[in-house]
Image (tube, rainbow, N blue to C red):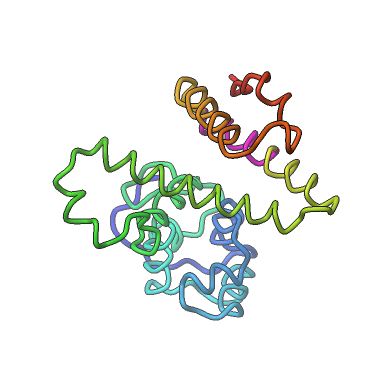
Amino acid sequence: MQYDGLQMAQKPAKRHVLANARIEIGLSQGDLANLLGYSTATVQRIEQGTLALSEELALKVQEALDISATWLLANDPASPPITPGFGLWNRFNYELARASQPEFEPVDISLRDKLERENEVKKEELSEDIAAREIYAKYRAMMKSARGSPKRTILRFRVAKAFAELEKDFPPDKESFEELSRLGYEKALAEYEPHAIGLGHIARRKPSKPKK
């Protein structure tokens, strides 16, 4: 279905397409309400079809989720969701839109001028490194908090499971994975005495390879 500009909102359906979009990206009604700056009750009523979606709110949803306001106002469940540029929409559009917001900027603003003088490859490498260190720091802190508890094993299982799911959509670069795994083992063995904490068997183990 082609859309040329914003249309008048149709009579609310039993369940608004906004609910389908929200569920697709894994947000609760409260999460979406906070993101838009509206009450949870407003989101609930729109999704239930007891309150018509206004053009103003549709535009806010478009900005937040990168989903077409025109598609939202048309409220046609038979029509697949689209972006403002009329391409097919899915959760990746939302994730990219959120990651592009200022609060998700992984680089300190004091480094911005310096980074702008560097090439794009170096910028991406720095961004990746900072994000990886933040994830690593949080994981280590969670592991430390769970020491001596069965939760530690559960945490490792859940993290491994989550990464296995992510690899389906974001397969890791094999060469980079093997190199970083090797460096990680070497650093760990250099910082801890193998005979003191029983890491001798790790020194003989090769890093596991990512699933194809």
Position of residue 59 relative to residue 126, above or below, is: below
Residue 107 at what x, y percent from top left?
A: 33, 55
Furthest-right residue in this view: 150
Q: Is residue 153 left or right of residue 20?
A: right
Relative to 72, residue 39 above or below: below
- The quadrant where residue 87 appears: top left
Residue drawn at the location 38% of the way across and 64% of the way down: 103
Say which residue appears at 53% left-offset and 34% top-offset: 187
Q: Picture coordinates of residue 116 (x, y %)? A: 17, 49
Confirm whether the magenta stretch covers residue 58: no
Residue extending furthest toward the left: 117
- Taking depth in this image into account, of 61 and 137 the one nearest to the observer is 137
**Residue ID at (64%, 65%):** 14
Q: Nearer the viewer, residue 103 or 155?
A: 155
Where, by quadrant of the figure, is residue 30 drawn?
bottom right
Dominant secondary-structure state across the stretch colored magenta = helix
Q: Position of residue 29 (x, y in %)?
A: 61, 68
The residue drawn where x is 44% and y is 58% is 65
Relative placement, left or right, of 209 versus 199 is left
Q: Is residue 61 left or right of residue 86?
A: right
Location of residue 118 (image quadrant) = top left
Task: Tell me the quarter of the image containing the N terminus.
Answer: top left
The answer to if 169 sits in the magenta stretch is: yes
Q: How many numbered dots are placed on residues in this image?
A: 0
Residue closer to the observer: 65 or 192: 192
Percent x, y of residue 181: 54, 28
**Which span is picked out in magenta?**
161-171
**Quarter occupied by the C terminus:** top right
